Image: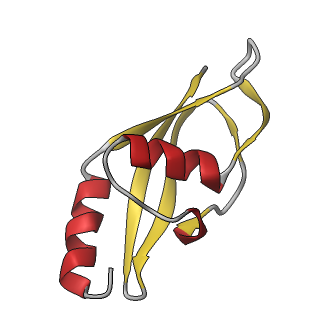
């Protein structure tokens, strides 16, 4: 992902999709632990786009089911806001 044109294409693909992240959760929607960058990278890869877990920026830990947004650094100059749907496994 060296050139910004390719990074812009990847950003469009990431921002145009919502990725499901299956996790172990309790009855109230609280997670056992938190969603990790590796979990998010695996969900995005399953959705057809490859990202490195080190490029995922988690502000606060995700500890509940539902919709969440994380930043993915696609390139030094390009960041994508990725929509996640955290669902019980």
Relative image position of residue 19 (x, y in whole percent): 41, 40
Residue 64 falls in image quadrant: top right
Relative image position of residue 50 (x, y in whole percent): 39, 58
| Image: 43 above or below 13 | above
Residue 27 falls in image quadrant: top right
Determine the residue located farthest toward the top in the rendered image. 27
What quarter of the picture does the N terminus occupy?
bottom left
Residue lying at 42% horizontally and 48% vertically, measured from the top left:
44
Q: Name the colour scheme.
A: secondary structure
Relative image position of residue 23 (x, y in whole percent): 64, 29
| Image: 44 above or below 27 | below
The number of discs equals 0
8 sits to left or right of 38:
left
Residue lying at 61% horizontally and 20% vertically, measured from the top left:
88
| Image: 74 above or below 69 | below
What quarter of the picture does the C terminus occupy?
top right
Residue lying at 40% horizontally and 61% vertically, measured from the top left:
81
Residue lying at 27% horizontally and 65% vertically, measured from the top left:
10
67 sits to left or right of 25:
left
Relative image position of residue 85 (x, y in whole percent): 48, 34
């Amino acid at each position: 992902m060296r050139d910004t044109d390719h990074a812009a294409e990847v950003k469009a693909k990431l921002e145009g999709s919502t990725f499901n992240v299956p996790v172990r959760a309790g009855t109230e929607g609280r997670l056992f632990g938190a969603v990790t960058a590796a979990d998010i990278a695996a969900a995005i890869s399953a959705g057809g786009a490859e990202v490195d877990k080190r490029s995922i920026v988690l502000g606060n830990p995700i500890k509940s089911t539902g919709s969440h947004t994380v930043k993915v650094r696609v390139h030094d100059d390009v960041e994508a806001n990725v929509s996640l749907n955290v669902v019980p496994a």
